[in-house]
Structures are given as structure tokens and as C-alpha cells.
Amino acid sequence: MAGHEFSEPADRKRKRLAADPASAADLRAVEQPRMPCDPAFRHGVVVGFDGSTSSERALAYAIGMARRSGSGLIIVHVANRLPTTVWAGCEPPVFVDVPDHRTEVLGLELACADYLAEVPWILVERGGDICHELEEVGREYSADAIVVGSTHGIVGRIFGSVAGRLAKRAQRPVVVIP
């Protein structure tokens, strides 16, 4: 079983709707949590996946975890969105997201993967801060755990690893796979 969920992050919606006072009702609707479409994924296992080697190991571990617990697997890809500023005369600048089409490629690869046949799974695309989005998806699906791969390299040393930041702020267990 496979699926996709493409949505705009709530924080971007709040900023966009807050600029328009006529859409106050829309702002209240955005602040309400989204419920998953399928109850099979409630109390599932959330895994961050970007196609890297460490995320593939995290996915393998999360598949085993979901299989053993009899729950669904929520695979989350946080897309690289490049903010672009558009200046329209006297108007304040508007930020436009340039989407990353990598999620579509990952979705096709995952749909063809034999190892995912063992558990029900869904692919969720988000844009924004990786830690925030993983925790948000975990909250929306009332996940039992979040599984991520460890970050290696200079970027993780400078900005801090996703796993380290997520472990500090998450409200549910975080499993870091080396």
C-alpha cells in the first residue's frame, strides 16, 4: 500500500494568511491539526528519508520496527525548497518556494521496492525545517517513534545534526541509526 501527501507547511500558511485580515477564519482552520486519512497509520513509525545511505539504513530499521509492532510506516521526505524573494513595488517582499521534484523520484523508487511489501506505508512530502517537520508529522499521526539516520560530514558539524536537534526537541522517542 503506498500513498502520497503533499502539503504546504502550517507555518508558511500562517504567515501568508496573517498578512490578509479577511482570512482570519482560514487562519483558525490552518491552526487545527490535520488528521491522517487512513487510521492504519495512527501510532505508526515515522522515518526521515532522503535517499542517502544513512536514511536507507534508517528506513530498513523502521520497516522492521513497524512490522514487529504491526503498525504502518510513515516515510517523510522534507523537500529542499529554495526561498526566492519577489519584490512588487511598494508591496512587502513575497517569498516563493521552488519545489524539489526529488520526492516524486523517491516515491517511484519506494513503490518498486520489494522490501516495503511487508508493511503498509505512506510517503509524506513536507518543506521547511527537517526537525520541525518530522516532529509535526509524528504529532499528526500520533507516532510511536521517529527514526532518522545520523548525519556525517562538515555540514552536520557546523549546523548540528538533524538527529541531535530532533532528539533534544522531540516529544516522542527518537531512534538514531548510524
Image (spheres, rainbow, N blue to C red):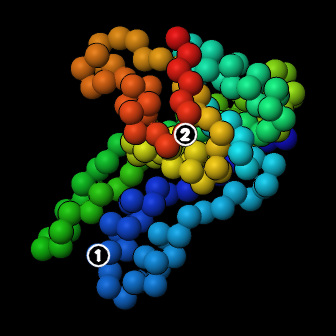
Marks 2 and 1: CB-CB under 8 Å?
no
Q: Where is residue 135 in the image (x, y as percent from the top left)?
A: 50, 44
Q: Residue furthest left?
A: 90
Depicted 139 relative to depicted 2: above or below: below
Q: Work out how far the residue at label 2 is from the one at label 1, CA to CA, in angstroms.
A: 33 Å
Q: What residue type is labelled 2?
A: Arg
Q: Where is residue 40 in the image (x, y as percent from the top left)?
A: 81, 49
Residue assigned mark 2: 172
On the image, numbered disc 1 is attached to which residue? 19
Q: Residue at x 32, y 85 (%)?
A: 21
Name the disc covering residue 116, or none: none
Tell which of 150 and 168 is nearer to you.
Answer: 168
Q: Nearer the viewer, mark 2 or mark 1?
A: 2
Image position of 8 (left or right of 14): right
Q: Where is residue 65 in the image (x, y as percent from the top left)?
A: 74, 26
Within 10 angstroms of label 1, few (less than 14), some, or many (20 or more) residues?
Answer: few
Residue at screen point 68% across, 36% down: 45
Could you tell me if residue 52 is visible in this image?
no
Q: Earlier in the sequence, mark 2 or mark 1?
A: 1
Tag 2: Cα neighbours inside 10 Å, few (<14), some, or many (≥20)?
A: some
